[in-house]
């Protein structure tokens, strides 16, 4: 997957064009994509048209919750993104290249597979005034009751920002590790250091100026996510008023059309914030680059930064989050200053409501199985230069898109049906699947296709009997990614499902408002278990299928 | 004077090189020849300080009476030239060279003058502000060598630097490299699998696949 991403990020690979694309197959490739994305266009109009009224904007302006919601959203998303970039870049600067970097890279996939909602629940259990951290401090400070501090759901969204920063720093590290695997980047490091520059200086003068432009899209995706995140914001963000995304969600789901119009207007604002901030960041970067002085040749010896140990707290947070969920799920009585439950029992597991689990499972399986042919046909016959358009849902705030989806479903009178629910996940599942598969697909040795067609196979047959079977491992990995993306969806499930379908994600978020931490921990763990199981299956299956074929492993 | 004392290179149980002792005088070019996989590039990686963790090395590496194999890459003062030019794509041709120029040349103007003079010397007058990507392969190779030499290394390592150039360019660039090394008067190790790369009357050390002491033959 890292390889796939590397190729995607490689600007040069865009220049490669698939040879021999027939016109008919072109349409075949575009059809499924149109079915998935097409309804969004009129939907966008239906959803956003109510905002074309000055009165709506005036009412938004006059809304009492709006200024502070905007403030919390800006603070949490900007701070979260900046911190995530800072964490990821300092880790890379400090540790790349070294054995520690490789070790860090190996641990990433497991952390990445923890969904955002489950992460937020675990983070809540860690840092809440009665959480594990406070209990740890209590051992030394001799507290007998939880401190009277606001550590989560603070009015400015700072705890949300911190959680976003940690979660997204793993994603950015993963993207970086893909780029840093390139031979030329590794060698440039050696060349610059052999010219007398320290590792830190090389990063600053040589690597970052080259890597940053390529990190632009992933960073934009992180920022867009922070702007429009609802599940994490409900669990960790401020309550009254909530963040802008949560407020928009309340407005859009209000039966009163004036509130719906206000929600549309506010989601346009989210989009504008993204554009303005992206433009500002781009401009600042260009300005900084233009003002770089002529190379002065000053070689600064490496300062003793190696002691700086950022990765331990970062990874420890991840492990602690899963552990605290596990402990809560088996806790029976657990009073405040105690680090461990006084008594444990499996009651919460025995009384678990498994219906969200099964709904999530069939939904994820359906979404990834529907997207797989669409992705394969698109990569084989589709016009590859439009890949960027398909990636749009990943870098645009989810809010206007979900509203558009819902509007389209209302007009088709399909809202609340299983088909609508599955479709609502596809605009996010498909881009992630194409992004994961595109690298391996382009790296495929085209001569194998040429040979099989020379043997008399049609292109279809050659794909079915040669290309796709050989690509079994990346295809299965792609399915696992698609499944994981579907599991993590929150907003589309709520809107398109019309409240009739409950997944582990929506259930975990709904339970977070209640007081039963045991039941909440169980649902959060189920949400983690599903993607982890799918990735494990994706690792094992190709090994088993190709057990007699060494060349495929 | 470059000295390698009793080097043993291995990868797990597999020994690539053993008992390698080598002296290279200033201005001398010693060629290390051998088939691919014989460990000749690994030898250069060890000397520059970038040995892959999969390999183990014992032995000492001395340059001008200072032991270097225990130093970091940036402290070793050794130049390296790979088969790819590896010019930094975000810097202009001139800034690539200025990056290597020691900081005793002070001030942007003075440094730019130095770089422009170097460019003139290698026949690239007026190339200061060009994007490296717009240069021909031969031009990039020349800039890359000059970047290595401008940092005033005390030894030079060449890792198949001619293998990616076409035949005519190859002969040209080869004599350019040897000429520049002669001017700098530093010990040089050249790794290659092409006998034509060996300079006239140069020493050649052959590393065979069997990679034991008896197989290190000199002509």
Image: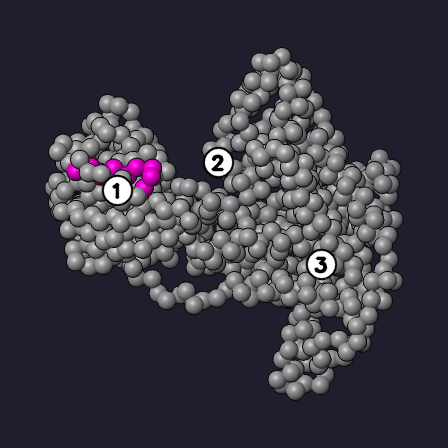
Q: Is residue A441 left or right of residue B211?
A: right
Q: Which residue is drawn at 59% across and 65% down?
A: A316
Task: Please rate how many residues cluster around mark 3, counting C-alpha atoms within 10 Å: few if below 14, some from 14 to 19, many from 20.
Answer: many
Q: Does the magenta stretch include residue A95?
A: no
Q: Foreground mark, 3 or 2?
A: 3
Q: What stretch is highlighted in magenta?
A: B203-211
Check the residue under mark 2 and report the chain it is in: A
Residue A482 in the image: state x and y as whole percent.
Answer: 69, 42
Element under disc 1: helix
Q: Name the residue under label 2.
A: A11
The type of colouring in the image is one colour
Task: Please rate how many residues cluster around mark 2, counting C-alpha atoms within 10 Å: few if below 14, some from 14 to 19, many from 20.
Answer: few
Between the residue at mark 3 and the residue at mark 2, the CA separation in whole angstroms equals 35 Å
Task: Please rate how many residues cluster around mark 1, counting C-alpha atoms within 10 Å: few if below 14, some from 14 to 19, many from 20.
Answer: few
Check the residue under mark 3 and report the chain it is in: A
Q: Earlier in the sequence, mark 3 or mark 2?
A: 2
Residue A125 in the image: state x and y as whole percent.
Answer: 70, 69
């Amino acid at each position: 997957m890292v390889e796939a991403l590397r190729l995607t990020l490689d600007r040069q690979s865009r220049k490669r064009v698939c040879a021999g694309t027939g016109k008919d197959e072109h349409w075949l490739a575009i059809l499924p994509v149109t079915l998935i994305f097409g309804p969004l266009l009129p939907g966008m109009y239906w959803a956003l048209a109510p905002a074309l009224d000055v009165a709506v904007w005036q009412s938004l302006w006059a809304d009492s919750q709006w200024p502070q919601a905007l403030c919390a959203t800006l603070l949490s998303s900007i701070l979260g993104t900046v911190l995530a970039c800072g964490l990821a870049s300092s880790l890379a600067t400090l540790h790349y290249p070294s054995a520690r970097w490789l070790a860090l890279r190996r641990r990433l996939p497991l952390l990445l597979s923890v969904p955002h909602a489950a992460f937020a629940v675990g983070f809540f259990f860690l840092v809440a005034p009665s959480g594990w951290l406070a209990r740890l401090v209590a051992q030394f400070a001799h507290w007998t009751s939880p401190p009277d501090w606001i550590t989560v759901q603070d009015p400015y969204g700072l705890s949300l920002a911190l959680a976003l920063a940690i979660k997204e720093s793993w994603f950015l590290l993963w993207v970086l590790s893909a780029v840093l695997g390139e031979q030329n980047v590794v060698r440039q490091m050696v060349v610059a250091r052999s010219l007398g520059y320290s590792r830190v200086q090389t990063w600053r003068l040589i690597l970052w100026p080259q890597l940053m432009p390529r990190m632009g899209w992933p960073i934009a995706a992180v920022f867009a996510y922070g702007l429009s995140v609802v599940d994490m914001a409900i669990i960790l963000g401020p309550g009254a008023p909530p963040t802008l995304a949560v407020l928009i969600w309340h407005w859009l789901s209000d039966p009163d059309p004036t509130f719906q119009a206000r929600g549309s207007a506010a989601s346009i604002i989210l989009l504008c914030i993204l554009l303005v901030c992206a433009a500002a960041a781009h401009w600042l970067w260009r300005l900084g680059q233009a003002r770089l002085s002529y190379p002065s040749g000053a070689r600064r010896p490496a300062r003793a930064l190696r002691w700086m140990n950022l990765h331990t707290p970062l990874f420890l947070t991840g492990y602690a989050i899963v552990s605290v969920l596990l402990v809560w799920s088996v806790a029976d009585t657990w009073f405040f200053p105690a680090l461990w439950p006084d008594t444990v029992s499996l009651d919460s597991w025995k009384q678990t409501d498994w219906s969200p689990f099964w709904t999530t499972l069939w939904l994820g399986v359906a979404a990834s199985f529907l997207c797989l042919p669409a992705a394969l046909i698109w990569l084989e016959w589709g016009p590859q230069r439009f890949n960027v358009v398909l990636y749009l849902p990943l870098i645009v705030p989810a809010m206007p898109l979900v509203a558009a989806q819902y509007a389209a479903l209302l007009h088709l009178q399909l809202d609340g049906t299983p088909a609508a629910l599955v479709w609502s996940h596809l605009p996010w599942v498909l881009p992630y699947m194409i992004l994961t598969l595109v690298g391996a697909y382009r790296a495929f040795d085209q001569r194998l296709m040429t040979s099989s067609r020379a043997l008399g196979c049609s292109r279809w047959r050659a794909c079915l009997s040669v290309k796709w079977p050989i690509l079994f491992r990346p295809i299965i990995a792609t399915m696992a990614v698609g499944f994981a993306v579907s599991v993590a969806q929150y907003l589309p499930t709520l809107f398109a499902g019309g409240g009739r379908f409950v997944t582990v994600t929506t259930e975990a978020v709904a339970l977070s408002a209640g007081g039963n931490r045991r039941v909440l921990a169980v649902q959060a763990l189920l949400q983690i278990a599903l993607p982890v199981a799918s990735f494990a299956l994706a690792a094992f299956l190709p090994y088993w299928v190709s057990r007699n074929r060494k060349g495929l492993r | 004077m470059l000295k390698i004392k009793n080097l043993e290179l291995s990868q797990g149980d597999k020994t690539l090189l053993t008992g390698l002792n080598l002296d290279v005088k200033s201005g001398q070019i010693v060629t290390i020849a051998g088939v691919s996989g014989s460990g000749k590039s690994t030898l250069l990686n060890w000397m520059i300080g970038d040995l892959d963790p999969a390999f183990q090395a014992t032995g000492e590496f001395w340059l001008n009476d200072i032991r270097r194999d225990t130093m970091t890459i940036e402290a070793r003062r050794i130049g390296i030239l790979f088969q790819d030019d590896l010019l930094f794509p975000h810097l202009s041709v001139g800034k690539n060279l200025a990056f290597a120029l020691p900081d005793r040349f002070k001030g942007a103007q003075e440094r730019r003058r130095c770089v422009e003079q170097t460019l003139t010397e290698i026949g690239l007058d007026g190339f200061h502000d060009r994007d490296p990507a717009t240069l021909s392969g031969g031009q990039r190779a020349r800039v890359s060598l000059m970047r290595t030499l401008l940092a005033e290394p005390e030894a030079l390592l060449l890792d198949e630097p001619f293998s990616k150039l076409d035949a005519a360019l190859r002969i040209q660039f080869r004599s350019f490299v040897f000429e520049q090394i002669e001017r700098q008067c530093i010990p040089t190790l050249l790794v290659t699998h092409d006998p034509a790369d060996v300079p006239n009357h140069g020493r050649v050390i052959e590393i065979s696949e069997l990679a034991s002491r008896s197989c290190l033959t000199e002509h």
